[in-house]
Image (cartoon, coloured by chain):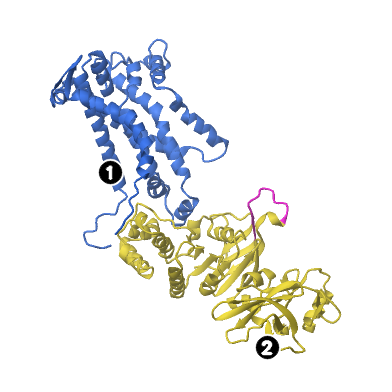
Chain colours: A blue, B yellow
Amino acid sequence: MNKVENNKAWFLVLPMLVLVSFSAVIPLMTVVNYSIQDILGNSAFFVGTEWFEKTLNDPDLQGALLRQFAFSFTILAIEVPLGIAIALLMPKKGWQASAVLILVILPLLVPWNVVGSMWQIFTRGDIGLMGYGINALGYDYSITSNATDAWVTIILMDVWHWTPLIALLCYSGLRAIPEAYYQAARIDRASNWAVFRYIQLPKLTNVLVIGVLLRFMHSFMIYAEPFVLTGGGPGSSTTFLSQSLTSMAIGQQDLGPSAAFSIIYFLIILAVSYVFYIAIMNMQKDKVNTQGGA
Amino acid sequence: MAEITLSSLAHTYETNPSSPEDYAIRKMDHVWHQGGAYALLGPSGCGKSTMLNIISGLLQPSEGDVIFDSRIVNDLSPEERNIAQVFQFPVVYDTMTVFENLAFPLRNIKTPAHKIAPRVHEVAEILELTSVLKRKAKNLNADEKQKVSMGRGLVRDDVSAILFDEPLTVIDPQLKWKLRRKLKQIHEQFNITMIYVTHDQLEASTFAEKIAVMYEGKMVQFGSPRELFERPAHTFVGFFIGSPGMNFLEVAITDSGAQYGDIAIPINPHQHAIAKASDSGNIKLGIRPEFVHVWDDRNDEAFEVNVKDVEDLGTYRIMSFYFGDSLLRARLHEDQRVPQKKAYVSFPEQWLTLYIDEYRVEVGNE
C-alpha cells in the first residue's frame, strides 16, 4: 500500500492552537506551577501535594464548598422548573410575544455587580422597597444580621437574574416543535399533562442540557452579586467558593494554596458538569436489553 | 364507524374572502361512505390537506357542515369525532418505547391493560414492528418512526375513519409498496373508512377503490381509477392521471366537425351538436396517448404528422409528434413498428372526448 501522507491540514489548526494556548493553557499551567511549588521572590521549592492537602483540610474552605453546593442546587431546583413554566405561559405570536420577550430578557442585561447594588438598596430597611415593606409587615428583616434572610435574598436575587435565561432557551425550544406533534396528540386524545410530559419536555431536553450546565457553572462561580449584597456575611454564612479563593489569593497572598484550590475548584465544576451531561443524555438511551429483545 | 357527509362545505384562510380564488376549498357536497377505501388526489396546494383536517376536526370549516351519519360535527374536536389521523412526517413520542407509543391512544381512552397488549402486538405484527417494541421511539429510523405513527392510527378499532395525509412520503420505495398493501389488507380486515391523501396517482390507484381528484379547491372528479383513466371529467384529470397525460387540442367548431388550425377533425355527431349549441370559446378535444391510433402506412383516415422523437420506456415507447403546431404524444406498444420522421395517426371517435370550459361533455351512448 502506497498511501500518500498529507498532513498539511494540521497547519490549519495552528492559529487556533496558538490562540487557545494564550487564552487557556498557559495561564492554567502557571496555576499548576504555583500549586506544586512554594515560590518566594526568586526562590522556588517543590512541595508536591502539600498545598492540595492543606486546602482540602481547611475547614473554612470545606464550609464554603458545602454552601456552594447548597446554593447551586437550590437555584437549579427553582430556576429550571420556573423557567419552563414561564416559557409555557409566554404568548406564542403577535406583538404580545415580542413585548413579553423583552420584559423577560431585561434582567439578563444588568451587569452582575449592578444586580448586587440594586438588591442591596432594594432590601435596605430604611429606603429599600422590599426591606421596608417586609419590616412594615411586622417581620424583622435584615440581611446583615440574619443568615436565613441573607440566604433567601441571595437566592431570590439569583432567581430574578437568571431564570429568564432558562425561560428564553425553553421558549425557543418550544417554538421549534412542529405543529403536527400537537395535532397528533389531539388525535391520540392526550391530556394537557401528557402533551407536556411526552412532547414538550422531551423536545426541550437539548436546550435544558445547555441551560442546566450554564446555570450550574455560572452559579458555582458566583462572586460579584453576593459580594456586593452581603459581603459574604453575616459571619461567613454567605461566603461562597470564589470569594474564599479571592480573599486567600489577593487578601493573604497565599499563592500556593490558592493555586491548588483553583485546580480543585476547576475539577469539581468539570466533574459535576460531566455527570449532569451524562445523566441527561442517558435518559434518552434504550434500556439495556437483557432478554435480547431487540 | 360512520358515513361522512360534507354539505355545502367551503373553507377559506382569509378573513374577508372576495373571490372564489380566496377559497382553499370551494363550495362542495360529497359523501364518503362507511367502509370505503378512498384516495384524495391532487397537486400541492389544491386543498387536500385542508379537506382532511376539516374532516378530522383539526380545522373548522368556514362554511357548510361536516356530518357523521346524521349528526353535525362542525364544533366537535377530533377526539369527540373519534377520528384517527396519520401525518406526512413521523410523529413519535420520543421518550416512550414503541410499545408505549402504540398503546398511548388506547391508554388515553382508559382501555384495560389486558386488552391493550394483544391489540398492540397485533398491530405491531402487521407493521413488522414486533422486534423493536422495546426500543425507544427516538432511536428508530425514519421508516420505523412512520410505521409507529401509522400504528397509532390503526390501534384503535372503534374509530369513525382513519385519515392518512401523504403518510408514505418519507418511506423508501420498496417499503412503500409493502405498506400500501398492508393498509389495503387492514382495510379489508377491519372494514374501516379510510381516506388517503396523496399527490401520487400510482399510490392512489393501488390503495383506493375510488379516487377524488382535487384541483384548485374543487373536487373535479370522484370515481374508480379506471373511470379516471378512460373518462376524465375535467381536463385537469386528463392531464394529471396517466403518464404521459392526455393530449388536448383547442378547437373551433365548424358545420361539419371540429377544426384545429386548418386541419379538420371528425367528431361524433352527438358531441358536435352539443358543441355547436354552446357559446363558449373554450372548447377542447382530448385523447389519451394510449388511444391515439398509429398506422404503419398512409391511409385515408390518418393524418400525416412529423415525428419529434420516440422515447423507449422499456415495455412501450412514447412517440412525440407535431400536430399542427401542437406537440402531442402517442403510445406505441413493444412490437409496433417505430415510425421514422413521418407517422400516420388517427383519433378513434369513441376515445375522443369533448371538453367545454374544461369539463367533459357526456355522450349519450356511454
Q: Chain of mark 2?
A: B
Q: Please indicate whether residue B57 sits to the left or right of residue A126 in the image.
A: right
Q: Nearer the viewer, residue B126 or B178?
A: B178
**Residue placed farthest to the top in the image?**
A126
Which percent across, then down, holds residue B74?
Answer: 58, 57
* Residue B11 part of the magenta-drawn span: yes
Determine the residue positioned at 66% across, 48% down.
Answer: B15
| Range drawn in magenta | B9-19
The residue nearer to you, when weighing A60 against A199, is A60
Determine the image quadrant of residue B59.
bottom right
Can you tell which quarter of the image residue A42 is in?
Answer: top left
Camera sees residue A71? no
The picture places residue B71, in percent across and down from the top left corner, at: 56, 62
Q: Give the image quarter of residue A83.
A: top left
Would you say residue A48 is visible in this rendering? yes
Give the image location of residue B67, x and y in percent: 58, 63
* Residue A187 badge: none
Residue B303 at what x, y percent from top left? 75, 83
At 68% from the left and 84% from the top, the residue drawn is B293
Residue underneath mark 1? A279
Task: Say few, some or many: other residues with alpha carbon within 10 Å of mark 1 (under 14 / 14 to 19 / 20 or more).
Answer: few
Instruction: Specify whether B217 is left or right of A67.
Output: right
Residue depicted at x 32% and y 17%:
A227
Residue placed most toward the observer, A247 or B115 = A247
Q: Please tell me whether the stretch drawn in magenta is mainly helix, strand or loop.
A: loop
Residue type highlighted by circle 1? Ala
Q: Is residue B3 magenta?
A: no
